[in-house]
Image: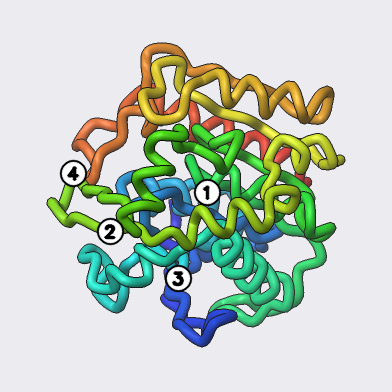
């Protein structure tokens, strides 16, 4: 495979905070660009993200991976140096970020792009998968969608947890990889309460009229496969549900990536590339 160019970029985000990313450029004539959205506690360089973008670019799709403004990562691509951004992040902020980068891709404004793109692909993992569904339902330029281990609902906390969160003014969240401990503010709860209809992932899936692939591990320990099944059901005949046996939330990937590519991840990658190749032909 010819060597790909991967120019980094920085965009001023909707709230003025920089959105940092990388655009994997295909060696030959480009197909429509694909935007990749990471999940909760994820980031653009985590585990399979670079490999996913590389595979898409290898198939001709300019592939963009970026850090959401609430990811908690600043200029350091591995360290959570902006904890306050993470602690005050909301689903609505993520939607504004996604829309902003989609605009830049569609306008051909990112480094290495030479022309506007009237059609786009969108892919999200975990919380980013739910966000991708919401964004696709609002943006007619998105012509194909893939979700990996996507959430089907934003209200993910039981009543006792929410009550304690409100009472204390924060919810402790630990990042097992780094040991960082965050104090999530109630901003997330306020956002869900104020924008319940706009953040209804299954309703958004039901409104979609584009080809969609829902990929989910049968042993997902973070987002039960029932949520993937619910998304696929909401999509109806427009969606294809790929259940991947014997694997969990990250399809065997870790950060850093293992030397040998997990078979489940290869399955997800191959199905994703094939889906975009057919849907964005």
Residue depicted at x 73% and y 78% = 107
Evaluate whether residue 65 shows in this view.
Answer: no
Give how far apart the Cα atoms at labels 2 and 1 are.
21 Å
Earlier in the chain: of badge 4 and badge 1, it is 1
Q: Position of residue 221 (x, y in %)?
A: 36, 24
Give how far apart the Cα atoms at labels 3 and 1 are.
13 Å
- Residue at mark 4: 176
141 lies left or right of 177: right
Labelled pair 2, 3 in contact (Cβ < 8 Å): no
Q: Quadrant of residue 73?
A: bottom left
Labelled pair 3, 1 in contact (Cβ < 8 Å): no
Q: Nearer the viewer, residue 3 or 192?
A: 192
Image height of 242 relative to 89, above or below: above
Earlier in the chain: of badge 2 and badge 3, it is 3
The coloring applied to the image is rainbow
Give how far apart the Cα atoms at labels 2 and 3 are.
17 Å
Dot 1 alpha-carbon crowd within 10 angstroms: few under 14, some 14 to 19, many 20 or more: many
- Residue at mark 1: 128
Q: Quadrant of residue 162?
A: top left
């Amino acid at each position: 495979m010819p060597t790909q160019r991967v120019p980094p970029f920085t965009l001023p985000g909707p709230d003025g905070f920089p959105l940092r990313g990388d655009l994997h450029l295909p060696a030959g004539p480009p197909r429509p660009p694909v935007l990749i959205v990471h999940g909760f506690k994820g980031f653009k360089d985590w585990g399979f993200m670079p490999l996913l973008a590389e595979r898409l670019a290898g198939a001709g799709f300019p592939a963009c991976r970026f850090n959401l403004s609430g990811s908690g990562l600043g200029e350091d691509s591995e360290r959570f140096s902006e904890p306050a951004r993470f602690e005050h992040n909301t689903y609505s902020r993520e939607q504004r970020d996604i829309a902003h980068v989609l605009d830049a891709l569609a306008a051909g404004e990112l480094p290495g792009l030479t022309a506007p793109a009237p059609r786009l692909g969108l892919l999200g993992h975990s919380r980013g998968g739910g966000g991708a569904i919401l964004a696709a339902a609002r943006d007619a330029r998105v012509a194909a969608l893939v979700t990996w281990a996507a959430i089907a609902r934003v209200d993910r906390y039981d009543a006792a947890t929410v009550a304690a969160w409100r009472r204390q003014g924060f919810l402790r969240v630990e990042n097992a990889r780094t040991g960082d401990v965050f104090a999530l503010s109630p901003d997330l709860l306020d956002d869900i309460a104020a924008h319940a209809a706009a953040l209804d992932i299954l309703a958004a899936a039901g409104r979609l009229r584009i080809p969609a692939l829902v990929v989910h591990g049968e042993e997902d320990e973070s987002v039960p496969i029932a949520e993937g099944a619910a998304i696929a059901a909401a999509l109806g005949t427009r969606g294809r549900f790929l259940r991947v046996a014997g694997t969990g939330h990250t399809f065997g990937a870790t950060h850093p990536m293992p030397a040998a590519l997990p078979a489940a991840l290869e399955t997800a990658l191959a199905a994703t590339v094939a889906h975009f190749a057919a849907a964005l032909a």
